[in-house]
Amino acid sequence: MLHPDFRINSPVMTPSASSIAPAADGGQFAAVFRDTRQEIVALIDQGFPAGDEALTPQGLLLRQRAQAAAAPLAVDGSHLDAQQQAFLGDILPHAQKAARALGVSPDIIAAHAALESGWGQAPLRRADGSSSHNLFGIKAGQGWRGERIAALTTEHQDGVDVKQVAPFRAYADYDGAFADYVSLLSSSPRFKAVQGVGSDAAAFAAVLARGGYATDPAYASKLQQTVSRLRGPA
């Protein structure tokens, strides 16, 4: 599910006009990361009453979610270029919400969106040119009842890259896109092991690769590299 090379008008859909939310500047990007700490720092400071062995699975996931939400707050985005900062500023609130639901660091979610959309520069678009808000390259199978678009994408088959037209999901806004992303990762047997990986980008990427999220054999490595790019120098 790599980002498309270009869009193709789909004859089975009537596109609706939609616009991307206004970009935030680099300072806003850093501030939003810091603000998230206030939501969960009390829980982490107070701790849990016992060790892992005494926690229910739900309790353990809750702690992993809280720790995951706190883990990436050292990232300030100052090492990224202006366009990358603006893109992250746009999606960060949605990435944080998805991260809390999955127990994964927000920077991993943001990096995944950046990889699939070319840092917001190569998004899936409707026939009228408006954004589909599908930042994660999620395809529209037969069971998808929402809006869909058609796009040319690159798939790796039998050792070679092949261009093909495929149907992709489209959303009214980023809220819908990120909610669907969370639903996919948390409900699919192929991907639900990403839940609770915290800041472990290698574990997150490995689950996606094993589950066939993309056909690119280097997908896991590319995702980890994008996370490292977002996090910046150690």
Image (tube, rainbow, N blue to C red):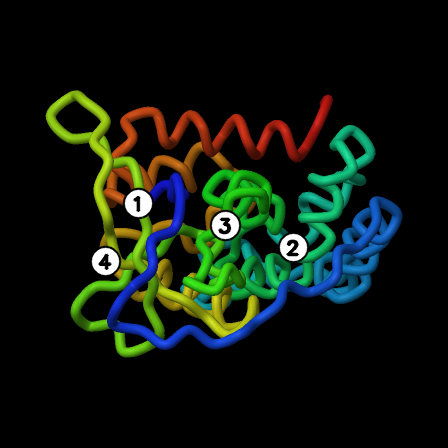
Q: Nearer the viewer, mark 3 or mark 2?
A: 3
Residue receiving disc 1: 152
Indicate the amino acid at tag 1: Leu
First in sequence: mark 1 vs mark 2:
2
Q: Quadrant of residue 182?
A: bottom left
Cα distance in 3D space between marks 1 and 3: 12 Å
> How packed is label 3: few (under 14 Cα within 10 Å), some, or many (20 or more)?
many
On the question of residue 146 being in view, the answer is yes
Q: Position of residue 222 (x, y in %)?
A: 45, 28
Which residue occupies the foreground of this view, 63 or 211? Answer: 211
Q: Residue at horizontal 68%, vertical 48%? A: 88
Residue type, mark 3 in image: Pro
Spot occupied by residue 183 in the image (x, y as percentages of width and height): 38, 68
Disc 4/disc 1 C-alpha distance (Å): 27 Å
Q: Secondary structure at mark 2?
A: helix
State which quarter of the image contains the N terminus. Answer: top left
Q: Using the rendered view, name the quadrant where residue 38 is placed.
A: bottom right
Circle 3: element type: loop
Instruction: State the residue position of label 3.
Output: 123
Of the image marks 4 and 1, the number of the one nearer the N terminus: 1
